Amino acid sequence: MNRKDHIRADESLLGYSIPLIHVILDAPVGWLGAGHRSIHHNIQTIKWIEEMFGKEGKYIALLHIMIDNRILDWELIKFINSDMN
Amino acid sequence: MPEGKDESRTEQGEINIDKKEFGKEIQNGHNDWKEKIRGAEEMVEKETNVEDEYRESFPRHMLMDSLLDKSLDFVVRTNPLDVVVKEVKNAKAELGNEIDLGQEVYKKVPSMMHKWLDMYDGVLDEGKNLPRDLIGRAAELAKEQRSTGK
């Protein structure tokens, strides 16, 4: 999912979004390409984002990681996004 | 001392030994050996202690591992999106698209998601000291559940 999809998923599932968190989490994509998920998508980054942005930030980071690791099914998110709008 | 002369020998070739000194040397040597044996015994004792500790800690580690696995499985199974999408699809099948029940259902989603994400974060927090990738394990479990449909 790209950044716009992540932001849309935040808004429909959490009711808010902080786009900067997605920029931080996906920052290594610039030099790692598709393998970016091995970096910044871990517990330490979640804790760091919680310290920087508070509890809302933690939820957004957790949701981002769950979507990228396909713990949450993309199809369900797309269905909800399309159904809500 | 002139070369070739040994003080411990007399001119007749008899060995002249100071008995007290000799006794002390033997005693010192005996004490040295005693210390060495004690050290070796302590080392053996330490080794067995480490072994015991390992034996005790191993089931605990295994237990933590399996409990966290079960908790992760539970968290992945209680995914609120599954519930919401099912509810919306059922409502649409019964009532058709004329009545927009979806919006009412979607109002519940943020609070459900917050609670669910808290659950997931709690499991990650519990297992943060384990040498295991819990996020990866959750992804595996989700994939298994999707493929088996359970």
Image (cartoon, coloured by chain):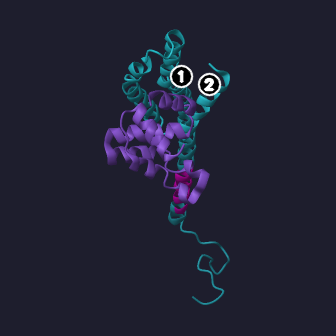
Residue contact between numbered discs 1 and 2, judged by CB atoms under 8 Å: yes
Whether residue B49 can be seen here: no
- Closer-to-camera residue (B92/B145): B92
Q: Is residue B68 magenta?
A: no
Given residues B39 and B58, the one toward you in this image is B58
Q: Residue at x 47, y 44 (%)?
A: A4
Q: Amino acid at mark 1?
A: Arg
- Asked if residue B75 is positioned above or below residue A67 in the image, the reply reads above
Query: Which chain letter matches label 2?
Result: B
Which chain identifier belongs to the cyan chain? B
Task: State the residue position of label 1.
Answer: B77
User: What label sits on residue B145 in the rendered view?
Assistant: 2
Residue A38, percent from left and from top: 56, 49
**Residue at horizontal 47 percent and vertical 41 percent from the top:** A6
Chain in purple (letter): A
- Identify the residue at horizontal 53%, vertical 47% (top origin): B38
Residue that protrudes farthest toward the bottom in the picture = B2
Let me know if residue A21 appears in the view: yes
- Asked if marks 1 and 2 fall on the same chain, the answer is yes
Horizontally, is A48 left or right of B16 in the view?
Answer: left
Label 1 crowd bin: few (<14), some (14–19), many (20+), radius 10 Å: some
Q: Quadrant of the N terminus of chain B?
A: bottom right
Give the mark, 1 or 2, whose residue is nearer the N terminus: 1
Query: Seen from this angle, which residue lies furthest top?
Result: B94
The C terminus of chain B - image quarter: top right
B147 vs A68, left or right, is right
The image quarter in which residue A55 lies: top left
Magenta residues span B25-37
